[in-house]
Amino acid sequence: MPSVLIIEDDSAIRQSLVAHLAARGFDVDASAHGLGGVESYTASSWDVVLLDLGLPDIDGVDVLKMIRALGDTPIIVATARDDERTIVALLNAGADDYVTKPYSAVHIEARINAVLRRGGGAAAAEVLEVGGLRIDLGAKEVTLEGEPLDLTLKEFELLAFLASRPGILVSKRELMAEVWRQPYGGADKTVDVHLSWLRRKLGETAAEPRYLHTRRGAGVRLVDPDA
């Protein structure tokens, strides 16, 4: 059972995250203050920390540095800013991932599972869900509205990677590195072809997308069409 420490001062957000993650099988604790969060971190062992930067008692970046000095637990930072300079500074300060506000509990769950998989954590959930899509990572099976989809292995890996970062714009270069293991290649056509095949199987087109939304020159994102 993955354990998650949430450090978030907004009571509505905090309670929503705790309720959702607990219902999904996570062991969750939460703190409304930065120093209280650091105390909770030192008092137990955690698989992931979700840290909001806008805390009432201490700057969230300072909390990030404190926790990083105490251990190597993956830290996901929640921030209202998404400019490159801010994100680079957070990653350099020790964050493993980030999410910009506003976000959903489902989004946070997917990001937690993503950092657990990257770290080799056995606690990572085996199922990802985005809208009517259900992706079973262990069985390598996908259903859409309860109906199975016949995907090739590479189509499955592409869809699973995008589902692990719901709503996040992912560049084709990153997809080539993470899905095709070609970090130096720029084979956009390979990605485009597989996206086209996926769209057809998801019952959509580039002109009328539902799950897969592309931005020319930037990348693609997987979204919940009903969100």
Image: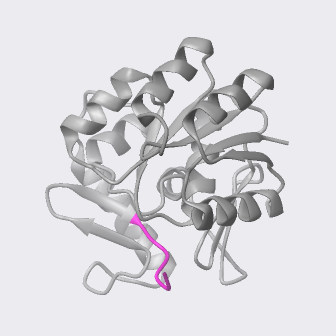
Spot occupied by residue 91 in the image (x, y as percentages of width and height): 37, 28
Q: Main secondary structure of the magenta part?
A: loop
Considering every residue shown, the one lying at the far top of the view is: 69
**Residue most extreme to the left:** 217
- Specify whether 116 is left or right of 191: right
Residue 153 position in % (x across, y down)? 58, 51
* Residue 14 position in % (x across, y down): 63, 58
Q: Is residue 77 left or right of residue 141?
A: left
Taking the spot 79% from the left edge, 24% from the top edge, the residue there is 43
Up-down relation of residue 75 to residue 82 (above or below): above
Instruction: State how the image is colored.
Output: one colour
Residue 174 visible within the image: yes
Q: Is residue 210 inside the magenta stretch? A: no
Q: Pick the residue in front: 45 or 184.
A: 45
Q: Quadrant of residue 11?
A: bottom right
Q: Quadrant of the N terminus?
A: top right
Residue 179 in view, yes or no:
no
Quadrant of the rendered image containing residue 205: bottom left
Q: Residue drawn 53% across and 58% down?
A: 163
Residue shown at the point (46%, 82%) measured from the top left? 225
Q: Which sits in the foreground, 76 or 192? A: 76
The correct choice, above or below, for 179 with respect to 159 in the image is above
User: What span is in magenta?
Assistant: 222-227
Horizontal side of 226 relative to 133 (left or right) equals left
Judge whether 102 appears above or below 149 on screen.
Answer: above
Q: Residue 98: x and y, percent?
A: 43, 43
The front one of 93 and 61 is 61
